[in-house]
Image (spheres, rainbow, N blue to C red):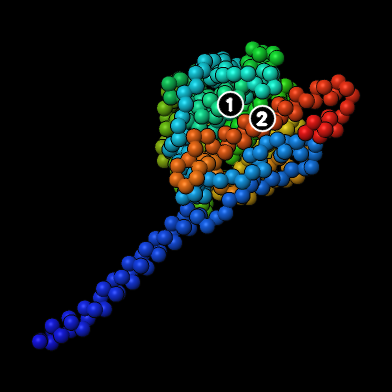
Amino acid sequence: MSAHESDLHTISPEMPAMFDGMKLAAVATVLYIIVRCLNLKSSTAAPDLTYQDTALNRFLLKSCSQLSKEYIPPLLWGKSGHLQTALYGKLGRVSSPHPCGIRKYLPMQDGATATFDLFEPLGDHQTGDDITMVICPGIGNHSEKHYIRTFVDYAQKDGYRCAVLNHLGALPNIELTSPRMFTYGCTWEFAAMVGYIKRAYPQTQLIVVGFSLGGNIVCKFLGENRVNQERVLCCVSVCQGYSALRAQETFLQWDQFRRFYNFLMADNMKKIILSHRHSLFGGSLLKKFDTDLNRLYIATSLTQIDDNIMRKFHGYSSLKEYYEKESCVHYIHNVDVPLLLVNAADDPLVHDSLLAIPRTLAAKKPNVIFALTLHGGHLGFFEGDVLFPQPLTWMDKVIVGYANTMCQWEKQKAPCQASHLTGSSCAEAKA
């Protein structure tokens, strides 16, 4: 046997063992990354609630089981806020229905045309009353989005009429009629929709619902003028950030890949703006916005777009002024109707520091409940066992459950007041 053959014979038995060790280490590393990324070791729990001990809140937590029960996301991926957010963004919902509605067009004083879709209830409400949900979707969203269609269909079946605002410029097949589109906190179009509903249905009572940016708009709308709260039974806001000024710095950080989400949202906003370039910047406005348009093409964040384009639709002199005036944090303390604020702790778009706003508000105001789930991502809140999510989400169920409970509360208050009992003692007796 040659020396070369002897060396091979000596080394060969060790090589498979070394390769097996490397394979095991690689598998262990991949499994560790999967467990960490999917957050599989995280426990499930009921939402963390901040509220004052009042008769209404006791009745609410007893009657609305979604707020007190454990929220269980799909086991394999539902504990990852990123996957919940990504699946909501791409899938919208698992099985999206197609509710039939009528599109309404409302001319505005500045020449803009607001649009909303109106969906009649598919049955009687459990209280026998006429109740309308006025709904404001997330940024750049409208009534045709899957998560909106799923929620509307569910609410209709529970006896609610639904009116869904289409953000100005968000619908690709609807042309703008003035050089303005939706902004972070402009309440004009939402106010026009609510006004129409109040006039068209003088007996109806309102449930106000806002998703993400829509949550900021509805809370700002209610707090701007107390007249706006007339005939409003309650309000639900899901996954909003409360203060654009405080959020802008966190949205530029790479923590939780927030900067990457910022880039994706900015890219979507650019597409919406550029699809209406002729209405927004055509004719005599072209020279005025020429430089801003050049900056828009190279923008990589919402902050840059807001500074160069969005704030100028309403004549704000600076980005700081735009964010301060458009954020609901300066108005939400004026909201006196029952208010449910919902966020997820693993929402990659809303930094944890922003959650001090709703938590502090709920601790101070008896009409506010702040519900914080461990999981859910941004507008995800999928439920399920192992892999496949259910068609309805926890978010859908909690909004309708909260609305049903508030309608019951109002229904039972009337006979109590007629018999000169206080609302609290009577409600507790009935509960």
Secondary element at tag 1: helix
Mark 1 and mark 2: Cα distance apart in space: 10 Å
Question: Looking at the rendered structure, which numbered label has been put on residue 11?
Answer: none
Question: In the current view of this chain or complex, which residue is farthest to the left?
Answer: 1
**Image: 374 above or below 410:** below
Q: Which residue does the image show at 21% across and 78% down from the upper left?
A: 12
Q: Position of residue 120 (x, y in %)?
A: 57, 17
* Residue 225 placement, left or right of 258: right
Which residue is identified by label 1? 155
Q: Is residue 1 above or below residue 265?
A: below
Quadrant containing the C terminus is top right
- Name the amino acid type tagged 1: Ala
Please state which of residues 209 and 349 is positioned toward the viewer in this rendering.
209
Sort mark 2 into few (<14), some (14-19) or many (20+) by Cα contacts within 10 Å: many
Q: Which residue is depicted at the point 64% across and 33% down?
A: 401
Residue 331 at x, y percent in the picture: 70, 34
Q: Earlier in the sequence, mark 1 or mark 2?
A: 1
In the image, what residue occupies the spot 43% across and 36% down? 91
* Image coords of residue 374 (percent x, y): 59, 49
- Give the SS element for disc 2: helix
Q: Nearer the viewer, residue 8 or 197?
A: 8
Compared across the picture, whether 149 is left or right of 21 comes to right
Residue annotated with mark 2:
403
Instruction: Say whether residue 427 is left or right of residue 248.
Output: right
Whether residue 52 is visible: yes
Contact (Cβ within 8 Å) of mark 1 with mark 2: yes
The x, y position of residue 352, in whole percent, is 61, 50
